[in-house]
Image (cartoon, rainbow, N blue to C red):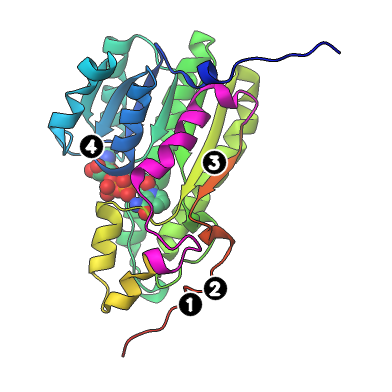
Amino acid sequence: MASTVKNVRSTFELSGRNYIVTGGAQGIGFTISRAICEMGGNVAIWDIQDKPVDDKEFNTWATEFGSKTLFVQTDVTKKESLEAAFKKTLDVFKTVDGCVPSAGIAIDKPFIDQTWDEFNRIQEINVRGTFFAVQMVARHLIEQKKPGSILLIASQSAHIALPGYRMAAYNTSKGGVMMLAKVLGVELAPHGIRVNTISPGFVDSDQTRNIREAKPSKREGEQMWLAPPNQRLSKQSDLTGAAIYFLSDASIHTTSADIAITGGLHAGTIDGLISYEK
Ligand SMILES: NC(=O)c1ccc[n+]([C@@H]2O[C@H](COP(=O)([O-])OP(=O)(O)OC[C@H]3O[C@@H](n4cnc5c(N)ncnc54)[C@H](O)[C@@H]3O)[C@@H](O)[C@H]2O)c1
């Protein structure tokens, strides 16, 4: 058989492609948004906040990377808000090629104390907000007869109980997100739409900082970098390689897949066994 060699570098390019990132005003969504622009793409950030937390950095992407950028204040728990954001995005971009729903919240609290309201809030942002943002993008891609790539943000919490943390409602939501990607990868494959997840470990962000700082003991909070076999707290930028891989044609034959970026914690922990300070 003749060889089918092909250069790999260009397959990671996102030039001219448009993506929606929910929850991108800060944190992981913001960092992935920047990476999309760096790789030539355009990005519409939808977030409940009224502007990116680092507005100055956001405003450099157009000149630094030649990207089109858009920020739309959006509440992913509200149907009308999601629909208005999508309309605004299409007004500017005309088409979209994929999305990264990153809006999410977490609560660290014993299972027996978690309330109906806390459970509902987590599911409506993490699961329902993701589900319907993806549905809008998938409908659009199917109508346009365009291929696309959708990247969901699951978590190590979709794989394991976290050492030192009690997050049953959050684990439930991220298990749901991971399964959603798996099933949509199959259902949407005939339309050329791929759906994958990354499962981040403990990543430095407001989410983890708030949870860590609310701990009764410093030692419990420190599990975030003591427990993973790599013994470090993940940076947001640790996720961008996998995110670009999944969004781009580099992963053209990859769907319903997950990459765990946990410093090894999804596989277990030996040195990180927790001891509680009395
Ligand atoms: N930080 C971690 O260790 C970690 C690990 C695994 C997965 N994740 C997931 O990654 C995603 C991003 O988390 P992060 O750490 O960057 O957190 P973050 O708190 O820094 O960012 C979350 C963003 O979501 C936005 N948001 C919240 N509610 C919203 C709503 N109703 N509508 C629109 N936007 C809303 C917030 O304004 C914020 O900008 C979340 O889904 C989170 O569960 C985080």
Relative side of 193 to 66, left or right? right
Q: Residue at x 34, y 63 (%)?
A: 116
Residue found at the far right of this picture: 1
User: Marks 2 and 4, how far apart in space?
Assistant: 36 Å
In whole angstroms, how far apart are the C-alphas of marks 3 and 2? 31 Å
Q: Tag 3's secondary structure?
A: helix
The residue that mark 1 highlights is: 273
| Mark nearer the N terminus (1 vs 3) | 3
Distance, label 1 to label 3, CA atoms, is 32 Å
Q: Which label number is shown at residue 180? A: 3
Q: Secondary structure at mark 2?
A: loop
CB under 8 Å between discs 4 and 1:
no
Residue range of the region highlighted in magenta in the rendering: 225-254
Choose mark 4 or mark 1, whichever is in front: 1
Cα distance, mark 4 to mark 3?
Answer: 24 Å
Residue 64 in view, yes or no: yes
Callout 3, which amino acid?
A: Leu
The quarter of the rendered structure image containing the N terminus is top right
* Callout 4: CB less than 8 Å from ligand 1: yes
Q: Is residue 144 above or below residue 229?
A: above
Whether tag 1 and tag 2 are in contact, CB under 8 A, the answer is: yes
Rendered location of residue 100, percent (x, y): 40, 33
**Would you call the spot at circle 1 few (<14 residues within 10 Å), some (14-19), or many (20 or more)?**
few
Q: Please state if 248 lies on the left or on the right of 202 as rendered.
A: right
Residue 247 lies in the magenta stretch: yes
Question: How much space separates mark 1 and mark 2, taking CA atoms?
Answer: 6 Å
The residue carrying mark 4 is 25
User: From what the image shows, is residue 38 above or below residue 239?
Assistant: above
The numbered mark, 4 or 3, whose residue comes first in the sequence reads 4
